Amino acid sequence: MSKREVGSGNPVIAELNDVWVGYNGKWVLKSIFLNCRAGEILGIVGPNGAGKSTLLKVIIGLIQPDRGSVSLFGKKPGKEARLDVGYLPQISHAERSFPVTALDVVLMGMYSRIGLFSRPGRKEREIALNMLSMVNMAEHAGRPFGVLSGGQQQRINIARALCSNPRLLMLDEPSTGVDSVAQEDFYVLLAKLRDEQGLSVIMVSHDIGVITSHADQVACLNVEVHYHGEPELCISDEIMEKVFGKDLKIMVHDSKCATCHMRHEDV
């Protein structure tokens, strides 16, 4: 997956200024200053319990901060701003085995616009099928979602999020349950959507190796933001110790690794 320079002239589409969030008398997020620009893939990395999922929910207005301000597309996060966001929370095992077809899953992405109790019509089905084609999953439209591989399910979930024609795609641990080859294909797809559709992406992960390999900008989070900038510069002993603690081992996955080489040999 190729990275690219995101100019300072690109408009800021999501911004947090001195945001604090607390639960049960304990700060989950402390003094967060962070932004994402148009046409950028921003990776937010940190250990379990670092506040990553909470941060995503703050950005789209599902959680209100105790202090500070949040701006999404130049306005306070709310129902209107969320229409421009495709949000994929972490997927549970129950969701993976739910008895619906791939097309049914994609059609679920239409309900934010047509209404929860409205029935998708021909127009909505055409849009859903086009989204499946975009992620190379059209041939699986009628297959049960639960029998598909983790990588295929993740592509279908991307198609579901794209049905609402979002300007920003937000992903919570998108590579969970996906093997390394499917992960690489998934991140190549994100780069294609960024380059061809102008889509911006914010994704969170505990996997520093994956994020630094595939994001344009990286934020290292553990309650506080300890770094925000170019991926290559975040892997310092000082930053990694603050975010992950001592004795961290980092493995970076790129196109030269054996897994990717085998995949390209099989094509």
Image (cartoon, rainbow, N blue to C red):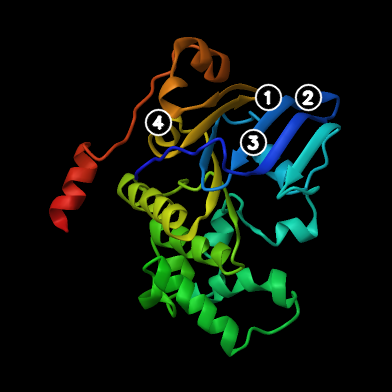
Callout 1: SS: loop
According to the picture, the residue beneath numbered tag 2 turns out to be 27
Q: Residue at 40% across / 48% down in the picture?
A: 187
Mark 2 residue element = strand
Residue at the spot x=64%, y=73% of the render?
110
Disc 4 is placed on an element classified as: helix
Q: Does 192 appear above or below 213? A: below
Above-or-below relation of 78 to 8: below
Between disc 4 and disc 3, whose residue precedes? 3
x and y percentages locating residue 71 in the rendered image: 75, 43
Which is in the foreground here, disc 4 or disc 3?
3
Could you tell me the amino acid type at mark 2?
Trp
Mark 2 and mark 1 residues within 8 Å of each other at the beta carbon: yes
What's the distance in space between the residues labelled 4 and 2, CA to CA?
A: 27 Å
Residue, x 29% and y 37% (percent of image)?
Answer: 254
- Image position of 117 (left or right of 42): right
Label at residue 209: 4
What residue did someone put label 1 on? 223
User: Could you tell me residue 45's position as x and y percent?
Assistant: 53, 31
x and y percentages locating residue 245 in the rendered image: 53, 15
- State the CA–CA distance, disc 2 to disc 3: 21 Å
Q: Earlier in the sequence, mark 3 or mark 1?
A: 3
Q: Is residue 259 left or right of residue 50?
A: left
Residue 35 has which mark? 3
